[in-house]
Amino acid sequence: MNTNNAGYNRLIHEEQAYNLRTLRDEHNEMLTTLNPKQRHVYLQ
């Protein structure tokens, strides 16, 4: 594997990890906006 490919793979991995964190944060934020009845339905 050449070094360019390794660097590219690392960038892709970092971007996916960032996206996963962002998605988790947005999901947690969304959960805090639900009222108890909505939360009950969503978390079943």
Image (cartoon, rainbow, N blue to C red):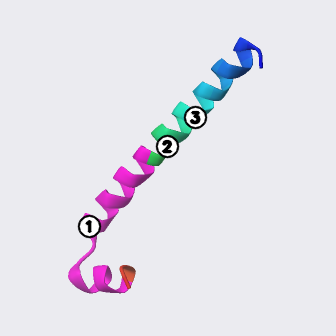
Q: Could you give the CA–CA distance between mark 1 and mark 3, rounded to whole angstroms?
A: 31 Å
The reply to whether the magenta stretch includes residue 15 is no
Q: Is 31 rendered above or below residue 16?
A: below
Q: Which residue is mark 1?
A: 33
- Element type at mark 1: helix
**Quadrant into which the C terminus falls:** bottom left
Label 3 CA crowd tier, 10 Å (few <14, some 14–19, many 20+): few
The amino acid type of the residue labelled 3 equals His
Q: Measured from the top left, where is residue 25 in percent x and y?
A: 35, 51
Foreground disc of the pair 3, 2? 3
Does the magenta stretch mainly form a helix, a strand or a loop? Answer: helix
**Mark 2 and 1 residues: CB-CB less than 8 Å, in contact?**
no
Where are the magenta residues, as a range?
Answer: 21-41
- Element type at mark 3: helix
Residue at image point 30% right, 67% down: 31
- Element type at mark 2: helix
Q: Is 12 rendered above or below residue 28?
A: above
Q: Measured from the top left, where is residue 7 in percent x and y?
A: 64, 19
User: Which mark is first along the chain, 3 or 1?
Assistant: 3
User: Which mark is first along the chain, 2 or 3?
Assistant: 3
Circle on res. 19: 2
